[in-house]
Image: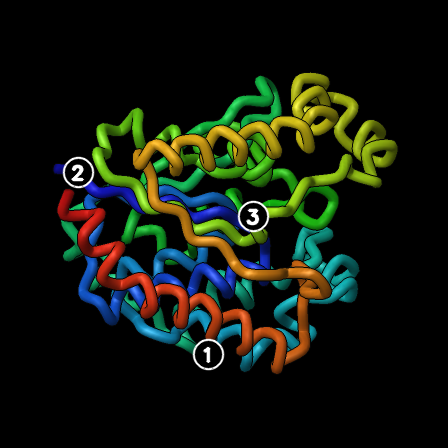
Amino acid sequence: MKRGLVLEGGALRTIYSSGVCDGLLEAGLEFDYVVGVSAGIAYGVSFLSRQFGRNLEIVTRYANDRRYMGFGNMLRPGNRHCYFGLDFVYDDIPNKLVPYDYAALDRWPGLAEAVVTDLETGKPAYFPVDESDQQFTLLRATCAMPLLFPIFDYQGMKCLDGGVADPIPWKRALEMGCDRVVVVLTREREFHRQPDRFLGLMRRVYRRYPRFLEVMERRAAAYDQCRAQLFEAERQGKVLVYAPDCTEGFSRTERDQVKIHALWQQGLDHARARADETTAYLRG
């Protein structure tokens, strides 16, 4: 039996997923395949290295640090007009400040994939997370939110945030042969996505990529459809879904330490409360 874990993105809202993953670590639950989008997999690598609480430490220490995120980074030479401090987030933190355990990732016997959106085709592409990539090049690309990040060239593909083309890659887990799939969302079950209010600006910025723009224009409807299909699969017992109770008032660039800790704690509490249920589901 092959067990899969799927992690939705959502920038700092993904601290909920970190709480859930920390609870899964506590319960000793393991997976053969992990796939994530944007911050879902960027935070999810700490689950693969079994570093409990690492993401909470990073966010609580650095969410209010302008080197981590802020519009000033978009004007800083060498940061490629990115809202987040690329080298600070993906190099200084994992390699110096809150060290990432690359050796543990290397020992993990499963396969982890990150999703990016191919600008030329508008389709998702899936790449394996490589422990030798200690600059987290792939994670930079999967996290590249339109307008807030530069376009990345990854293995010859011009790409942005994987959440545009495949926001919740649970079907990918099924395609990869997973019999049991746990999905961690970063929006409450009642949530419905609204059309992006910056579509006009995106049409100008990404005018060279018409297929990407087509995906952006139908992104809200596609996201809601993806969730509806996911919840139907859950009712049929094909997947097990975690979702926060409420994310209203929690920004994807949230800086409030109380809110951040509370959302992480909610994820941890959910995982603890459902530990027996999740264990039984994964055992089939």
Quadrant placement of the N terminus: top left
Disc 3 residue crowd, few under 14, some 14–19, many 20+, Cα 10 Å: some
- Tell me the amino acid under the disc marked 1: Glu
Q: Residues within 10 Å of mark 2 (few under 14, many from 20)?
A: some
Which of these two is toward me, 129 or 233?
Answer: 233
Which residue is nearer to you in this view: 257 or 228? 228
175 w.r.t. 149: above or below: above
**Of the residues tagged 1 and 3, which is closer to the observer?**
3
- Quarter of the image for residue 88 reads bottom right
Disc 1 to disc 3: CB gap under 8 Å: no
Using the image, tell me which numbered label, if any, was put on residue 2. 2
Which residue does the numbered mark 3 point to in the structure image?
Answer: 189
In this rendering, would 87 be left or right of 213?
Answer: left
Q: CA distance from mark 2 to mark 1?
A: 31 Å
The numbered mark, 2 or 3, whose residue comes first in the sequence reads 2
Q: Which residue is mark 1?
A: 57
